[in-house]
Image (spheres, rainbow, N blue to C red):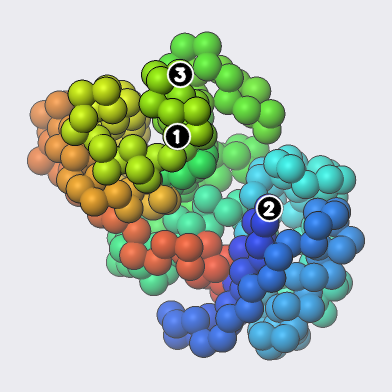
């Protein structure tokens, strides 16, 4: 069976024809600069059709924002204009000329890792993506956990801080993303006097320097607390870490070493942490998997 998976981002649209767990063909373009529904949906339809989507091949589209519980309408897509409340699943189907499924991008990342990545074969796992923001998705009993309103799995918004603002798309306070997302860490580094425009990749290479070490002690500790809290609530088989922050040499080892100190004794014996295998392809696989599971 095959499906087209599409990952809609603020800067780029990436798509792939997924067949038998492999991406057979790809396409990538800059997202239409208007970011408005009509032009973006037309762009995605054109790309999906070029990869073979249509009446015989369904399409899954993951979007950077919230959708309703029935996976029909956009609720809040950050930095896109005029999408909220629109029946975008139907609009995609009409534009593509075939069946379409929509999913949140972080949830699609989780589905992708289960479909063809580090969580393949697992029925209970969570994925946490550490990047500019912090996202993720939860699979429980083999099914994506979506909640009563379609918004479950927002792990970057668990509250570990105090009054730190979480950005215009959220406007909550003290969320994990607000203190440990890449943007937040760069701001903290600047406040610590580590440069007027600090770059986290460079600061990671200097992590053992006395002036830099407190930044990463803060980040690793809070991320470890967050993961431990999620493990206590969800009791997963494994935790998958994705996103750019994890790619620093030794990051995963240092993070994994911190988590047990915050775990209750039974959970220390079941802790399994893995790095994402699919990386930026995970949402494409997840979007395709969503379409295949529905159609």
Q: Position of residue 7 (x, y in %)?
A: 61, 63
Viewer-nearest residue: 276 or 150 = 276
**Quarter of the C terminus within the rendering:** bottom right
Establish if 181 lies above or below 109.
above
| Image location (x, y in percent) of residue 276 | 34, 59
- Marks 1 and 2 sit apart, C-alpha to C-alpha, by 23 Å
The residue at the far front in this view is 196
Q: Quadrant of residue 274?
A: bottom left
Residue at x-position 67% and y-position 65%: 13
- 2 relative to 131, above or below: below
Circle on res. 10: 2
| Earlier sequence position, callout 1 versus callout 2 | 2
> SS at mark 1?
loop
**Residue 241 appears in view:** no
- Reading the image, the residue beneath label 1 is 198
The reply to whether callout 1 and callout 3 are in contact (CB within 8 Å) is no
Determine whether, in the image, residue 236 is placed left or right of residue 83: left
Q: Which mark is residue 259?
A: none
Q: Which residue is mark 3?
A: 191
């Amino acid at each position: 069976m095959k499906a087209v998976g599409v990952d809609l981002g603020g800067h780029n649209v990436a798509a792939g024809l997924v067949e038998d767990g492999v991406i057979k063909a790809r396409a990538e373009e800059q997202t239409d600069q208007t970011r408005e529904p009509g032009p973006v949906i037309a762009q995605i339809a054109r790309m999906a059709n070029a990869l073979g989507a249509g009446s015989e091949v369904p399409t899954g589209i993951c979007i950077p924002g919230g959708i309703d519980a029935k996976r029909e309408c956009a609720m809040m897509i950050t930095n896109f204009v005029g999408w909220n409340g629109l029946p975008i699943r139907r609009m995609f189907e009409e534009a593509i000329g075939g069946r379409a499924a929509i999913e949140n991008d972080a949830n699609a990342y989780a589905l992708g890792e289960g479909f063809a990545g580090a969580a393949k074969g697992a029925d209970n796992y969570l994925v946490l993506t550490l990047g500019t923001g912090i996202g993720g998705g939860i699979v429980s009993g083999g099914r994506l956990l979506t909640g009563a309103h379609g918004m479950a799995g927002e792990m970057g918004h668990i509250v570990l801080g105090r009054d730190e603002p979480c950005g215009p798309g959220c406007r909550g306070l003290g969320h994990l993303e607000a203190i440990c997302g890449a943007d937040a860490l760069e701001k903290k580094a600047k406040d610590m006097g580590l440069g007027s425009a600090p770059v986290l990749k460079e600061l990671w290479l200097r992590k053992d320097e006395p002036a830099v070490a407190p930044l990463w002690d803060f980040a690793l500790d809070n991320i470890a607390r967050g993961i431990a809290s999620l493990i206590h609530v969800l009791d997963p088989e494994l935790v998958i870490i994705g996103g750019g922050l994890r790619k620093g040499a030794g990051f995963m080892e240092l993070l994994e070493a911190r988590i047990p100190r915050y775990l209750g004794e039974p959970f220390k014996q079941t802790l399994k942490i893995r790095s994402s295998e699919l990386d930026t392809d995970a949402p494409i696989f997840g979007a395709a998997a969503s379409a295949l599971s529905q159609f």
